[in-house]
Amino acid sequence: MERPGRLLLQSELRVRNAAYDVSLSRSLLIWKRRTSSPVYHPFRPRFCVPLFRRRPDPGVCHSVPVSEIISVREEEEENGSRQRDDGSWKKIREREGKDCRQAFTVLYVERCRQHRWRCAEVTFTCSDEAVCQHWVSSIREQLASNTSRPKHLLVYINPYGGKRQGKRIYEQKVAPLFTQAGISTSVIVTEYANHARDHLKMEAELKKFDGVVCVGGDGMFSEIIHGLIWRTQIDCGVDPNSPEEALSPCSLRIGIIPAGSTDCICFASVGTNDPVTSALHIIVGDSQPLDVCSVHHNNMFLRYSVSLLGYGFYGDVLSDSERKRWMGPARYDFSGLKMFLTHHYYEGTVSYLPAKGIIGTPRDATRCRSGCVICQHNGQLNSERSEKYEMDEASDSESSGEWRTIRGKFLAINAASMSCACPRSPKGLSPAAHLADGTTDLILVRKCSRFNFLRHLLRHTSKDDQFDLTFIEVHRVRRFRFMPRHCQSDSDLELDLHENSKRQIFSQICKDHPACGCAPAYSSWNCDGEILTHTGIDVRVHGQLIKLFARGIEELPVFEDLSNPCAI
Ligand SMILES: Nc1ncnc2c1ncn2[C@@H]1O[C@H](COP(=O)(O)OP(=O)(O)OP(=O)(O)O)[C@@H](O)[C@H]1O
Ligand SMILES: CCCCCCCCCCCCC/C=C/[C@@H](O)[C@H](CO)NC(C)=O
Ligand SMILES: [Ca+2]
C-alpha cells in the first residue's frame, strides 16, 4: 500500500450523514470516519486495509490510490434531487438545519475475488460550494496529470467470437465505463475474418489513438497483433518477412475485452476473463509488455504467436474443433477427449537454442506476477544482447554451435511463451513461463501410454509438477526449429530407414486411408488457435515486442500494520 505523501487537500466532508476527514495527496485519496467507536461494515470489502486479516475490518477508514480513480463528477441539483452524469437519478439531498449541501462522487477501482475489479463509488457532501468545486478540480487535475491513461481508443469487435456476445458485452459493460472515464472511441464491428488485421495494416489512422481494444477471443487478438506488428515494421522501415530482423516494438497498447472461447491471453495477463476488469485496466492506463514469437517456414513468414504453438495433441484438437465451431466453446472439450482417445504420435526433429544468462527455469515454483523481476531482469538482458548482436553478427549463437537437437516420436510438442493459463487449464501449459522474459518454454511429450499422457494432462489442474514425468522434457529457449520426419532430407532419413522402413511406407499409404487405423505421418501446428499451413517451422522469440493494457496477475496482498496509511 502506498503512503499518502504531501497532502494537496484536506477537509471535513460527509458521507451518508457521517463526518469524515478526507485528504488528497498525489498518490492517495483517504476518507476516515470522525468517530471514536469503530463501525463494522460487512458490505464494503475494500477499505483502507483491504484484506487486512488480523482484526475485523473497522469500516471507518478507506483509501484509494489516485491511479485507480476512474473519474469524479459533480452532482447537479434538479427538482429537489440531483441528476447524475449517466442520467440516472439519485436522491442525495441532505440538509443540516436549512443548509442545502453540495456533493461530488468519486468512482474508483474496487478489488473483488479472483483478480476481478469492479467500479465502486463514494459521494461526498459539504455545505460550502467552493470547497466542493476545489475538490472536484483537484482530483481532475491529478487524473489529467497521469499521461499513461488513454483518451482515444480504436475498438474492434468480433460479433462471432465465443458465444457471439461480443457486441452486447461491449455495449452494456464496457462502453458506459469508457464514457464515465472520458475516453472517446472509434468502434468497428468486423464484417469478415481478417477485417481488423487488414484495417490496422493499411487504413487505420493510428496517430489519432492511444491504444487499440480487441473485443473477442485469442483468434481476434491474433488479428490485432498481426495488423499492428506489420504496420509498425513498415512504418519503421523493418522487413517483417525476414526471420533474422530485430523487429521494432509497437508503441500502441492493446486492451483485450474477453469475448471468445478460451481467452487465454487475457486470463494469463490479468488473472480473470471478465470484461469489466479488463475495461478498468484500460481506463487506469496499465501497461504489460509481452513476448511475441515469429514463425517462419524456409525463410517465409507464416505467423506470430504469443501464447501456444502446439504440434501433435493441441494441433489435432484445434483442427478437429474447427469443424465443430457450431458447438461453441465446448468444441475444445469434445475434440480434446477425441484426440486423447485417438492417441496419435508423430516423428520429427526438434532443434533449439537454450536461453543462456537468464534467471528462471520452467520448473520454478515462482510465478510471473505483476511487476515480475524475472521479466525485468531478462528483458534488460535481451535488449543489451540485441544491441550487441547488431554490432557484431559473428556473436550469433547459431554460428558458435549452441544449438541442441532431439530426434524422436512425440505425442505433443508445445511452445508456451506465457503460462497459457485459462479456465480449462487454470495453471496453464507452462505454469512458470513469463509474459515478458524474451523466452518460450519448449515442452516435449514423448510417445507414452494413454495412461501416462492422462497423468500429464491431469497435472494441468492439480498441484503436481506436470513436467516431473520420465517421458517429458522442458527447455527454456530463445529459438527453435521443427522438422517432421516426412520432410527430412534423404540423408537424414537414411540414418534410421533400416529400422523403420516398413512403418514409413505404411504411414504414407495410410494417411490417405484413415479408416485402416494407422497413425497419420504428420499433425499440424496450432498457433494461438490458428492452424499453420506448414509443419517445418523456425520460431524466434522477440522479447517485449508488444504491450497490453494490463499489469500481470496481482499477488494476493499481505498487509502489515505499517502499510496502513490511515494509521499515519
Ligand atoms: N466478422 C467476422 N466474421 C467471421 N469471422 C470473424 C469475424 N471477425 C473476426 N473473425 C474471426 O473469428 C475467429 C474467432 O474469433 P475469436 O478469437 O474472437 O473467438 P473464438 O475462436 O471463439 O475464441 P478463442 O480464440 O479464444 O478460442 C478469429 O480467427 C477471427 O479472425
Ligand atoms: C482428456 C481430455 C483433455 C481435454 C483437453 C481440452 C483442451 C484444453 C485446452 C487448453 C488450451 C490452453 C492453451 C491455449 C491455447 C490458445 O492459444 C488457443 C486459442 O484460443 N486455444 C486452444 C484450445 O487451442
Ligand atoms: Ca515468455
Image (cartoon, rainbow, N blue to C red):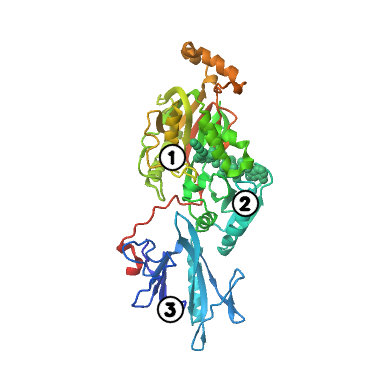
| Pointer 3 residue | 18
What crowding class fits label 1: few (fewer than 14 Cα within 10 Å), some (14-19), or many (20 or more)? many
Which numbered circle lies on residue 194? none
Residue 149 horizontal side relative to residue 204, left or right: left
| Element marked by disc 2 | loop
Looking at numbered disc 1 in the image, what kind of residue is underneath it? His
Which numbered circle lies on residue 165? 2
| Pointer 1 residue | 460
Q: Quadrant of the N terminus?
A: bottom left
Q: Position of residue 547 (x, y in %)?
A: 50, 47
CA–CA distance in space, label 2 to label 1: 28 Å
Q: Position of residue 511 (x, y in %)?
A: 59, 21
What crowding class fits label 3: few (fewer than 14 Cα within 10 Å), some (14-19), or many (20 or more)? few
| Element marked by disc 1 | loop
Within 8 Å of ligand 2, the CB of disc 1?
yes
Most foreground residue, 272 or 438: 272
